[in-house]
């Protein structure tokens, strides 16, 4: 096949990738202009600095640690996937700027994966959605950053892509690839650890009980491949911390962020002496030890005790706090990181539930850029979310496997929203932002096809 016939055959795929690379490069150098030096740009956030430190410690000291100097305390808060991805790149190039350029070119294939993922449902909608996703600001920003989100999204999309191909293929290759990429994604961000259950349910619904043997075999292959990928890290954590868990981030966020936010939401302040006592106990510990899996049992036990005392109250709070996942703008986070906008953000969901509309009004009328950015982003993502709900209402119009594929995409959106909960922001929405855009464009297309043309 010559080059002309290739580009003719894959015109849309080529257009998406070329456009994505071009736009990403422009965005990258635009972001870079706001920093005094390229090195400052590399570590523009605390998380980016931590991943650089962890990667260099692997190269120079053979340990996954966030410690800047000896002793290099093994880390169990962050999972190792992203650092091991960075490892060969920085080892071969020796330059973090080149690493970022390699990354952004690789991440420019994410819109293409969105197209490949969804074109079976509707090819025209998939193409339009992918083009829109090319220009999504949060995607552009995170793809130029030393952060995990874009790599996770790439691997997550590959997992979904091969999962959707399993019903069409009788072989085992697609199941192996699906489990493999899910395992890699989980090593980058442990939030994906429950997705094997989604895969099993999807296969059962699509293939049905008549093909139960195939469902069982494919599910087992996915799960076993997934476990094979993540098990070395589980063994490492069991050996070092006596805990066969991927990361301490879940229990840490629950006891140091979710529950304190809930108590402030419910009581106006933190009065729980057990929680206050935990902070007192931590004064004698190094911060890296507080983050460690060695403290996870203490954190998890206390969190469980507090939550069970007001389970339904916390459940209500958690659901309320998922709303920002769908509608927050993400633009203010970009401008604050770049140092362009320094207006202190406010917690809209908490203020609304408390009826404190005066503070919201003061923020929106402050005259700074932050409120304007919020309104623009909020309007866009609110429309996207509402249109996505329209697709759910029109599910009956979709036939066979397409309906189940839409349900799977919708379920993964809610999966990430629910597990993110009170820490919701645009960064954590990235893995499903493209899917949300696809659902919104599909809603417009379906409404036009099934309603206006009747």
Image (cartoon, rainbow, N blue to C red):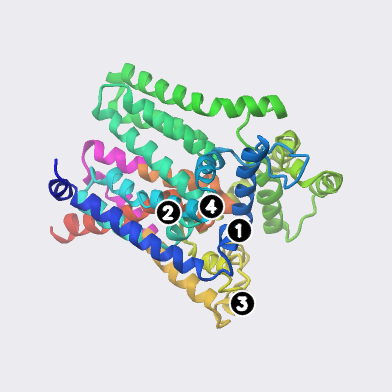
At x 60%, y 69%, the residue is 345
Per the rendered image, the range of residues in magenta is 385-408
Q: Of callouts 2 and 3, which one flags the residue occurring earlier in the amino acid sequence? A: 2
User: In front: mark 2 or mark 3?
Assistant: 2
Query: Residue 57: percent from the left, percent from the top?
Result: 66, 41
Q: Of callouts 4 and 1, which one flags the residue occurring earlier in the amino acid sequence? A: 1
Residues at circles 2 and 4 in contact by the CB criterion of under 8 Å: no
Helix, strand or loop status at disc 1: loop
Residue with the mark numbered 4: 95
Location of the N terminus (image quadrant): top left
Residues at circles 2 and 1 in contact by the CB criterion of under 8 Å: no
User: In front: mark 4 or mark 3?
Assistant: 4
Distance CA(mark 2)–CA(mark 4): 15 Å
Query: Residue 148: percent from the left, percent from the top?
Result: 52, 48
Mark number, residue 358: 3
295 relative to 28 in the view: left or right: right
Distance CA(mark 4)–CA(mark 1): 18 Å
Residue with the mark numbered 2: 104
> How many labels were placed on the picture?
4
User: In front: mark 2 or mark 1?
Assistant: 2
Give yes or no for residue 389 being in the magenta stretch. yes
Residue with the mark numbered 1: 45
What kind of secondary structure does the magenta stretch mostly adopt?
Answer: helix
Give yes or no for residue 173 being in the magenta stretch. no
């Amino acid at each position: 096949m010559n080059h002309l016939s290739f580009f003719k055959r894959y015109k849309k795929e080529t257009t998406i990738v070329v456009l994505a690379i071009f736009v990403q490069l422009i965005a990258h150098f635009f972001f870079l202009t706001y920093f005094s030096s390229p090195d400052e740009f590399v570590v523009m956030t605390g998380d980016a600095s931590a991943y650089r430190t962890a990667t260099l410690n692997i190269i120079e000291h053979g340990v996954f640690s966030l410690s800047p100097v000896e002793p290099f305390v093994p880390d169990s808060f962050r999972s190792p996937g992203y650092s091991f991805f960075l490892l060969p790149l920085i080892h071969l190039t020796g330059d973090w700027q080149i690493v970022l350029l390699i990354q952004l070119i690789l991440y420019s294939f994410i819109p293409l994966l969105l197209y490949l993922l969804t074109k079976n449902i509707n090819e025209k909608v998939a193409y339009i959605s992918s083009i829109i996703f090319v220009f999504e600001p949060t995607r552009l920003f995170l793809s130029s950053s030393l952060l995990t989100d874009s790599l996770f999204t790439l691997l997550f999309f590959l997992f979904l892509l091969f999962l959707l191909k399993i019903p069409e293929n009788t072989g085992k290759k697609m199941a192996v690839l699906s489990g493999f990429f899910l395992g890699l994604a989980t090593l980058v961000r442990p939030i994906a650890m429950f997705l094997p259950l989604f895969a099993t349910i999807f296969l059962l619904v699509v293939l049905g009980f008549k093909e139960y043997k195939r469902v069982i075999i494919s599910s087992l292959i996915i799960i076993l491949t997934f476990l094979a990928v993540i098990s070395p890290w589980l063994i490492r954590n069991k050996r070092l911390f006596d805990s066969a868990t991927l990361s301490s981030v879940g229990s840490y966020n629950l006891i140091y962020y979710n529950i304190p936010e809930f108590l402030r939401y419910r009581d106006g302040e933190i009065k729980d002496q057990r929680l206050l006592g935990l902070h007192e106990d931590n004064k004698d510990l190094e911060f890296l030890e507080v983050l460690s899996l060695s403290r996870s049992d203490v954190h998890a036990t206390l969190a469980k005790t507090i939550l069970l005392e007001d389970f339904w109250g916390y459940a209500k709070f958690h659901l309320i706090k998922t709303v920002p996942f769908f509608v927050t703008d993400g633009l203010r986070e970009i401008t604050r990181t770049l140092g362009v906008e320094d207006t202190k953000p406010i917690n809209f969901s908490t203020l609304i539930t408390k009826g404190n509309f005066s503070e919201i009004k003061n923020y929106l009328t402050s005259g700074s850029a932050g409120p304007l950015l919020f309104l623009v982003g909020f309007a866009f993502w609110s429309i996207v979310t509402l249109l996505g709900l329209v697709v759910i209402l029109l599910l009956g119009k979709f036939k066979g496997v397409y309906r189940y594929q839409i349900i799977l995409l919708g379920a993964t959106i809610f999966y990430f929203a629910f597990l993110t909960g009170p820490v919701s922001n645009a960064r954590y929405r990235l893995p499903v932002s493209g899917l949300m855009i696809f659902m919104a464009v599909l809603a417009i297309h379906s409404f036009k096809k099934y309603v206006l043309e009747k």
